[in-house]
Image (cartoon, helix red, strand yellow):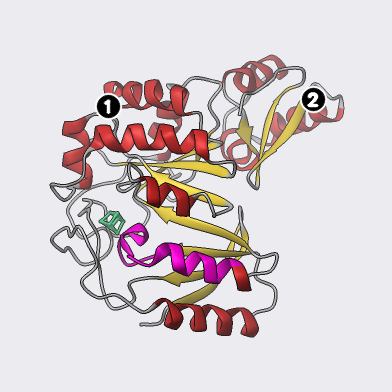
Amino acid sequence: MGIIFGPIASRRFGKSLGIDLSPGGKQCNFDCVYCELTPAKPLDHYDKVLPPEEILDAVREGLARHDDIDVLTMTANGEPTLYPHLAELMEGIDALRGSTRTLILSNASTIDHEDIRRVLCRFDTVKLSLDCATVPCFKRIDRPHPTVNLERIKEGMLAFRKEYSGNLIVEILVVEGINDKEREIEALDEYLRLLRPERIDLGTIDRPPTYRVRPVPYSRLRELSLSFDPSLHVHISSRKDISDLLPSSYSEEEILETLSKRPLTREDIDLLMDEESRERFRKLLDEDRISSLENNGVIFYKPSGKTIDN
Ligand code: SF4
């Protein structure tokens, strides 16, 4: 398996070239029930470590082959922040990336370590997973290594929020029967109101997981998204199971009311509203009664004059 994968076209980040820090197999300190990789006992360190020079050579070659890459996405068959030479690697990447942006996808397990937070601060965008804010739910869904502690993760994320000036995105993956309960979403909402990430991606299982767990339908994601404080930017990132959702008719007032409760993306509008309602939406937009706001590559719509905190 190669270190570099892609390019992948991403709606939000543009053309992305992936960097896998563990191409030989899964090395992770979680064993999430929804993981699509082969189940493996959680580790607190990498057993197989690639030299940073080898990864840098692969990145250099990838960027030379594809001269239109918008973002380098660091990930792993597992958790990228367990890679022990991350700081050195990022120094090398910063030296060769030019104007290409950087993104890391992490399960947040190591964010309580100051040295890890320092490296993460070098990325333009940091996307951290947080599936549950309570310990029993976290242990059930993410099945972490015993050294991982949810309360320390939450404190570490708050510290990172203060230290980091880039785009912080939090990803919540909803699994039926585990973190789809109101009380779990309330606990997440309470914490995320303190954290105030730029965006929250609320998704569900899109690809076949190894364990027998099930996604929730889009309609449930939508309901859960309404349980978050309206000032939080919640983006429903799963579009797989939308067969249960029929577009509805919205009056102008209903459109404005819905948007005042929760800013919506164009995709949400296309899914939720029937043709006539979309026509009303376009009219409100033309009349400047609705305005748009760009947030990390996603356009949200809200009633004009209503401010949305970042
Ligand atoms: S953090 Fe990612 S790689 Fe690790 S077990 Fe969970 S889904 Fe799999």
**Residue name at image x 46 percent, y 22 percent:** 193
Q: Is residue 82 magenta?
A: yes
* Residue underneath mark 1: 181
For residue 281, side relative to residue 234 (left or right): right
Q: Secondary structure at mark 2?
A: helix
Question: Callout 1: 10 Å neighbours few (<14), some, many (20+)?
Answer: few
**Residue name at image x 71 percent, y 17 percent:** 306
Give the quadrant of residue 81: bottom left
Q: How many marks?
A: 2
Name the quadrant where ligand 1 sits: bottom left
For residue 256, side relative to residue 175 (left or right): right
Q: Is residue 104 visible?
A: yes
For the residues bearing labels 1 and 2, Cβ distance under 8 angstroms: no
Q: Secondary structure at mark 1?
A: loop
* Residue underneath mark 2: 284
- Percent x, y for residue 166? 59, 45
- Percent x, y for residue 236? 49, 39
The magenta region covers: 75-94
- Which amino acid, by three-letter code, is at mark 2? Leu
- Percent x, y for residue 113? 33, 46
Q: Is mark 1 within 8 Å of ligand 1?
A: no
- Which amino acid, by three-letter code, is at mark 1? Lys
